[in-house]
Image (spheres, rainbow, N blue to C red):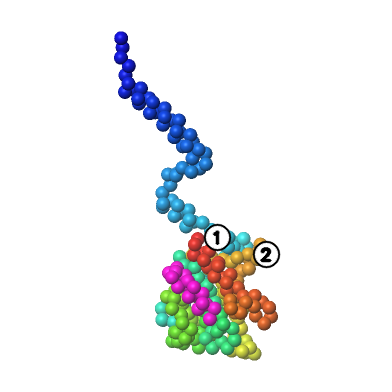
Amino acid sequence: MKKTNYSYIGIAFIVLVFGIIFIPKIVDRISNDDVIRNESRSDFADDKKNKKSDLAFIEINGEPKKVPAFSFTNQDRKTITNKDYEGKVYVIEFFFTTCPTICPRMNANLIQIQNTFKDFENFGVASFTINPDYDTPEILKAYAEQYGVTNPNWHLMTGDKATIYKLSNEGFNLYTAEEDDVAGGFEHSGNFALVDKNGFIRSRKDDFGNPIIYYRGIVSEAEKVDEDGTPEEISALKEDIKKLLNE
């Protein structure tokens, strides 16, 4: 008489129990998308890095507008070009140190923005003087110290007047002009431009889906609105800087 092989029976019983208990759970996890996929951390990091925010690209003739090439001298007498800002999110302004009206308010707001992003090495500011005949590197250095400029990526730049005005009026469409009959002798918009890490001008959209293009730089967050009822946009600018830093 042939003996029963109890070892095989035991193994078969264990397999049967495993199938009854665990296979339904595995199927359930798969159906609920709860199984860890074979994805590397680097793949996830690349996906996050390449994710674009909802900020608009400013387009000219259907093409995203990029910061024009420039080369000027900063407050430390160093030559600064647009390439020094590659890989950085930065704010653009045009100003002059003897401005008796809007420039002090603009730069007070930029100092606040600087301090908000003090821990970000890839954030900066590009300030171009529209009175280069007076605003030498030494003057710009004293101005930076007076206002509390500490960000190493905040360059206050001077250079050829015609080149600066072309950069302002044509490169950024930020109006600047010499006007003898206005306070200080120069006129400019008081707006800021926002540039992403790849050198493209970006902005949020208005209620109609159109880019606002620029951010009002004169009214502070604390003021909320100016005397004409115009609301501040510094808080919006801060929010959008964060978005670009996360792209």
Q: Are marks 2 and 1 in contact (CB under 8 Å)?
A: no
Residue 53: numbered disc: 1
| Quarter of the N terminus within the rendering | top left
Mark with earlier residue (2, 1): 1
In the image, the segment drawn in magenta is 108-125
Residue 24 position, x and y percent, is: 48, 34
In the rendered image, the vertical position of residue 244 relative to residue 14, given as above or below: below
Residue 16 position, x and y percent, is: 42, 27
Residue 2 position, x and y percent, is: 31, 12
Indicate yes or no whether the magenta region holds residue 174.
no
Viewer-nearest residue: 160 or 99: 99
Residue 71 seen in the figure? no
Indicate yes or no whether the magenta region holds residue 124.
yes
Image quadrant assignment for residue 10: top left
Circle 2 packing at 10 Å, graded few (<14), some (14-19), many (20+), is few
Image quadrant assignment for residue 235: bottom right
Residue 139 seen in the figure? yes
Q: Amino acid at mark 1?
A: Ser
Circle 2 sits on which residue? 207
Residue 127 position, x and y percent, is: 51, 78
Viewer-nearest residue: 170 or 212: 212
Circle 1 packing at 10 Å, graded few (<14), some (14-19), many (20+), is some
Viewer-nearest residue: 206 or 222: 222
Q: Residue at x 51, y 84 (%)?
A: 132
Residue 70: numbered disc: none
